[in-house]
Amino acid sequence: MTDENYIVLARKYRPKKFSDIIGQNEVCSVIEGAIKLKRVAHAFLFSGTRGVGKTTIARILAKTLNCESLDGNTLNPCEKCSNCISIQKESNIDVIEIDAASRTGVADVREIIENINYKPVNAKKKVFIIDEVHMLSKAAFNALLKTLEEPPLDVVFIFATTETEKVPITILSRCQKFVLRRVDFNKISEHLVNISEKEGFTLDLESANLISVCSEGSLRDALSILENVLAKNKPIDIDLVRQTIGLSDHSQCLDLFEFIFKGKVVEAMNKFQSLYENGISTDELAKLLMTYSYNLATLKSGVKNSNDFLDSKTNERLKKISEIYEMDFITRFWELMQKYLNELSDTFDEKQCFEMTIIRICYVSLIPTPFEVLKKTSTVKTEVSIDEKKKNDFKDNENTDRAQTNHHRSSNDNLALKKKIVEPNLSSNDHTNDLEKFSNIVQLIEDNSEMLIAYHLRHSFRLVSFTEFIGDKPVSNVELESVSANEESKNILWKASKLLTNLTKKRWVLSITNKKGLQSLTEFSESKYKDRINEIKKEQTIKKILDIIPHSEVVSIEKIVKENKETKDG
């Protein structure tokens, strides 16, 4: 076969009869039953994602309806009569295939309507195959309505579309609808192995599985990927397939996955840079990270994953990771990846966006999950008095050590770690002390010119608790209630955590909780200011002034500082 006559695999191995169709047994059985019982509808609509066989089934149906020597038992076209041969070559005058994406106007539909009035020339039925029918204009659909409802007995319409929701309901109601499913990964893998053998290549099952997963259920996409692999003209193995698709090996990607889980920003960024330089696409890497988190969740929950085509080493490593992290931590990672990676398609720089995604998710590890907060709260007890604390010292330490053992994680950088906790009393004096401590750290942030962060901490949050964690590394946990509708205020907490960690050389965690807070710093300052005014009112001198001046009131206090300026004659 010369280069000029080469036909790509997707066309070369296109099915020629219903029994060759892969993964659409239900649709084919219904159509075959209708043909046997001679209950063939006048209009069909095939819908489904790309590469699942919509146009192929439409052509086979047209061939079956017009075959001169149809096998009544198997309903397979003979492939020898003039109609079968001409339809296969797309040259039959009675089988008209139209691309609605390029012929969208009402004039094109009028041309179809005019041709309907003529009887078939050679075939038994005149068949109109309209691909991507959702692209027709509203006027074109309206012009087709009456003809589609009551066409001549020897006319059949077959529509194919990837977007059924764009087809008017008036059209849908006049058609026999079939929804084609994504092709099963196992069936795609078997098909790829068979085609490789026919082409003179050996494709192992692991490589075929990787191609089928990347095809996302589209047989045409899978064959296109296989085409690129075969074009390398090398012995096919999993590394060659990964290189062709743009994937790196799982060990490298799993390293990145673990670094993100542990919140190690520098290591994660360096690993991503290495993977990116080796040719991996951000889109494929994102899908791979999502697949890892999905497999972690299924392992953790004990659900069997029937579409798991990861190699045994990767699965073993994921199993070890699943033993370290809790389910809520894994699901939060998946949700954040899903949210952030949706931005990839709309960004001006995919690499930069992916790097920001890595940074954001790494810093999210500073914030405990809701489940971790609940577990921590259940183990925290109110600090007792000094005498009681001395008596119960041994017992408290024993409980704390048990909590540390039960909830320990291998990563010291993740707040999933459980450490000994010291929490203040809930008395009013301790509330004041906590608010003053919180005020001091906000003042520290303001002194370092981070005015926006300080402003939100003063106005947008109420302090719930100020807790110190005592363990291998000193940690302070500040729980806040958000009182602002401004989403920007919530996004600065991780910045504040990082800034305080850098300034104090001690780990800080500022997080949002659903509990009711004490006061915001603004409310705390106003409360102290009102208390000061009330104290001033009680002074004898002020009382006399207020009595002398009718309806007078103390509304503000201002401290006046006198400056002594001395001038020297020089």
Image: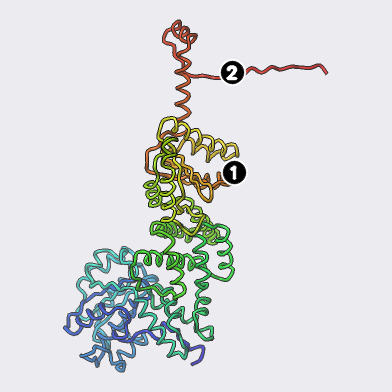
Say what secondary structure mark 1 lies in: helix
| On-image quarter of the C terminus | top right
Instruction: Please state if 29 lies on the left or on the right of 564 as rendered.
Output: left
- Circle number at residue 78: none
Q: Tell me where residue 29 appears, x and y as whole percent.
A: 23, 81
Q: Hey, what amino acid is under mark 2? A: Ile
Q: Tell me where residue 128 appears, x and y as whole percent.
A: 29, 78
Q: Hey, what amino acid is under mark 1? A: Leu
Q: Tell me where residue 242 appears, x and y as whole percent.
A: 50, 76
Point 45% across, 5% down: residue: 548
Q: Nearer the viewer, residue 99 or 122?
A: 99
Other residues around mark 1 within 10 Å, as few (<14) / some (14–19) / many (≥20): few
Residue identified by numbered label 2 = 560
Q: Is residue 568 above or below residue 499?
A: above
Residue 484 visible to an observer of this rendering: no
Residue identified by numbered label 1 = 503
Other residues around mark 2 within 10 Å, as few (<14) / some (14–19) / many (≥20): few
- Which mark's residue is nearer the viewer, 2 or 1? 1
Mark-to-mark CA distance, 2 and 1: 34 Å
Q: Is residue 266 above or below residue 423?
A: below
Residue 36 visible to an observer of this rendering: yes
